[in-house]
Amino acid sequence: MLSIAELPKYESYKDSGYEWLGKVPESWGLLANKHIFKIKKNLVGKRSAEYDLLSLTLKGVIKRDMENPEGKFPAEFDTYQEVKPGDFVFCLFDVEETPRAVGLSPFDGMITGAYTVLEADPGFDSQFLYYFYLNLDGKKRLKPLYRGLRNTIPKESLLSFKTFVPTFEQQQDIARFLDKKTTQIDEAIAIKEQQIALLKERKQIIIQKAVTQGLDPTVPMKDSGVDWIGEIPAHWDIKKLRYLGVTQNGISAGAEYFGEGSPFVSYGDVYKNRQLPELVAGLAKSTDSDQKIYSVMDGDVFFTRTSETVDEIGFASICFRDIEKATFAGFLIRFRPRTDLLIKEFSKYYFNAELLRKYFVKEMNLVIRASLSQELLKNLSVVLPPVSEQLEIYKYLEKKLHQIDDAISIQILQIEKLKEYKTTLINSAVTGKIRITPDMVEA
């Protein structure tokens, strides 16, 4: 990987006039966008069926899948505007909150009229301009142009904004260099993401084998009687969850109930954590009665109960310590097991084994929102090793998975460094901090 500090610089620089930008190459020009871009507003009207539907995302401008739609669509697309390959798509409202406010379309299609579509003059390299504004958007450098509560950039302000541009040949060199290097970086990131996926898959295999077959491969086995579980050790038991403890839906109340008071376990606390945090951020004005009925105690297992998709249902988080005066959300189900049959340590891994996803996905009652009923949860089959073995399995998994988690953390750190390098490389190239030469493009 090229060291940015070692890359060549321009011979002389001048003050850009922007504190965040600092100095730019002496040879670069400063040009208002009205000389670079032209606003387009070609509505598709009654011809919308002839166009692909496009969206602006973190991955740039993409085609939407109309046959398997995600999200909401309007009844008609008459007010949508035409987009051609090479057109820029800007989101000029809610700019601060929008993850990606600029895109360069590779497609013919249509996009919501809420966006601003621009066409670059052929005397400028569109790919260079895209990298330039992608760099600005990444750090929200257009903040001085915001107006109103929605952080809107007026079109005339964008057209008055000045872009620093090198010669056309330099623009091309910079764009080609960044195309090449960012592709290499993205490929390296993809390999590491694949390695992370394989490590996570390995984790699930280890968990599933341990919680359904135990740690001794020589013990006699028997059929569990449950197709998605398969064989289990002959001396283990298996029972429906209904016979192992009691379940309780969480508290439902109006908005005024939340925001202050006593600890409150939210949907997010459970969905994001396999072991419930001892300190939860949520607060609720719960009464003594609420805190008794909806208590959060050592050994409790909380399941996500409702969501818009099946994929978010049935995730479990296990409480390892009482949370005093706490209550929990109505979008959750609490299962309080008998500790002589099922201990929290084994619960942490059994209820988060991948094989349980098959059960929930298969059995889920999907109407408008996916919803896990207590009855469905109570019908879940639970494998029960002797309590002493449950603890052994927990200790084994804690040690084994910690090693895999360390390997995943290393990959994540390396990905973050690659992303940081990519951002710095783009910034350095499009602001003239480094000089891109034709031989660097070909190298």
Image (cartoon, rainbow, N blue to C red):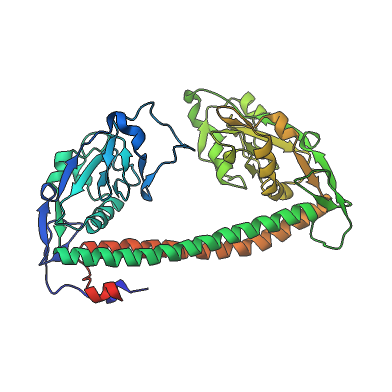
- Left or right for 379, reference 438: right
Residue 383 visible somewhere in the drawing: yes
Residue 158 visible somewhere in the drawing: no
Give x and y (percent) for residue 160: 12, 45
- Left or right for 238, reference 179: right
> Relative to 361, does residue 421 appear above or below in the rendering?
below
- Left or right for 117, reference 367: left
Front residue of this view, candidates 259 and 307: 307
Q: Which quadrant is the N terminus positioned in?
A: bottom left
> Relative to 385, does residue 282 appear above or below in the rendering?
above
Picture residue at 75% right of the left edge, 56% below the top: 210
Front residue of this view, candidates 232 and 347: 232
Give x and y (percent) for residue 321: 66, 44
Front residue of this view, candidates 325 and 337: 337
> Which of the 4 image quadrants contains residue 250?
top right
Picture residue at 55% right of the left edge, 60% below the top: 196
Q: Which quadrant is the C terminus positioned in?
A: bottom left
Give x and y (percent) for residue 375: 72, 29
